[in-house]
Amino acid sequence: MNLLERTHAGFAATFGHPPVGVAFAPGRVNLIGEHVDYNDGLVLPMPILAGTAVAWSPWAEDQIDAVALDFGNARDRFTIGVAQPHQPADWRSYLRGMAGCMAERGYRAPGAKLAIAGSIPRGSGLSSSASLCVAVGRALAAASGTPARPPRELALAAQAAEQEWAGVNCGIMDQMAIAAGNHGHALLIDCRNLSTQQVTLPSDWAVMIVQSGVQRGLVDGHYNQRRNDCEVAAAAIGVAALRDATSEQVEAATLGPTTRDRARHVVSEIARVGAAVGAIEAQNLPALGMILRASHASLRDQFEVSVPAVDALVRCLNTAIGSNGGARMTGGGFGGAVVAVMRSEDIAQVEAALHDGYRLPDGSTPLLMPA
Ligand code: GLA
């Protein structure tokens, strides 16, 4: 049974009748542009095959009755506008948050019965939470029977749900990639004005995801701290956001060593996004590979969001891929997945090298998953 069938069947088993529809939202992998979205920067994520499905049926006005098929059929029943965040934050916080944030933004608040299931490994840095919010948003929008709104409105509601209901001061990249992206294509997002441009990769390149096996732990504190470091740097330089700073300004400003390193990463990473788009358009895989490697080094050494197991996996992949591509950590960091771009014809050889050269923390060999 695939994800949509499983969700459909789970709805029918829970509520005793089939759903009216099943909404879906993918996860995302970020090719490049890490920790720059909340600095008004440029990012280049891609939607992935794995995602979240929400089977829905309209119900009494303002009332939600939801079942989480992946959490032992746990239930959540609440009234939109009255519900409070669930403590500690879990799937219920995102669900209640998304319903509440949509109502605040003028979506008619329909009641709905919902069954939720997903295929994104949790803690993988592939945006299972933004995927959940956007999938819930699509289900509630469909249940309300009102005309579809622009993807960016759904993305902004999903970001507000994550910030206000789960306490993560996230940027807008994940929600925009998921709400506005098309599978098989990267999406260049300008996080200052939310304009987007689809970027198509050459058909003989492959974007692969590899799980490090290190789950992202309780990192929200680290994430919010990084964001705070960037705001301190921007204020000291005298710019609205690090997007507006040059490397010369970063070097000349009065900053502590850690804050300067954070700013160095952001300014250089935004430049790398532009360079990466140029390399893709020129179909220059060796150039893109070097840019991906430089991004990883900057995230590891200057932004300090990688961990040794991810560094080792990236090293192993980069050695196996050679000059025709490259790999880097992807997402918020502190574990999770790695993204690698290579020639499609090299996938089997890279996979063989990983089998010989890398073991996950549990002793198993990592898998290469197509994005
Ligand atoms: C998380 C956040 C995003 C972004 C990335 C890092 O995924 O949700 O907004 O900041 O980390 O690039």
Image: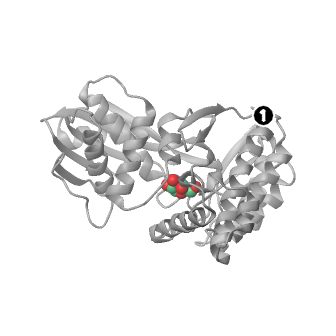
**How far across and how far down the image is residue 251, in percent?**
74, 67
Q: Amino acid at mark 1?
A: Glu
Point out the residue furthest to the front here: 238
**In the picture provided, is 82 more to the left or to the right than 88?**
left
Residue visible at 84% across and 47% down in the picture: 287
Q: Nearer the viewer, residue 75 or 249?
A: 249
Is 204 placed above or below 76 here? above
Helix, strand, or loop for circle 1? helix
Q: How many marks?
A: 1
Q: Quadrant of the C terminus?
A: top right
Point out the residue furthest to the left here: 60
Judge: label 1 CB < 8 Å from ligand 1: no
Asked whether the viewer can see residue 358, the reply is no
The quarter of the displayed image where residue 279 is located: top right
Residue visible at 75% across and 59% down in the picture: 247
**How far across and how far down the image is residue 246, in percent?**
72, 56
Is 271 placed above or below 18 here? below
User: Which residue does the numbered mark 1 point to in the structure image?
Assistant: 281
**In the picture provided, is 179 more to the left or to the right than 354?**
left
**How far across and how far down the image is residue 82, in percent?**
15, 51
Is 122 placed above or below 202 here? below
Mark 1 Cα-neighbour bin, 10 Å: few <14, some 14–19, many ≥20:
few
Q: Quadrant of the N terminus?
A: top left
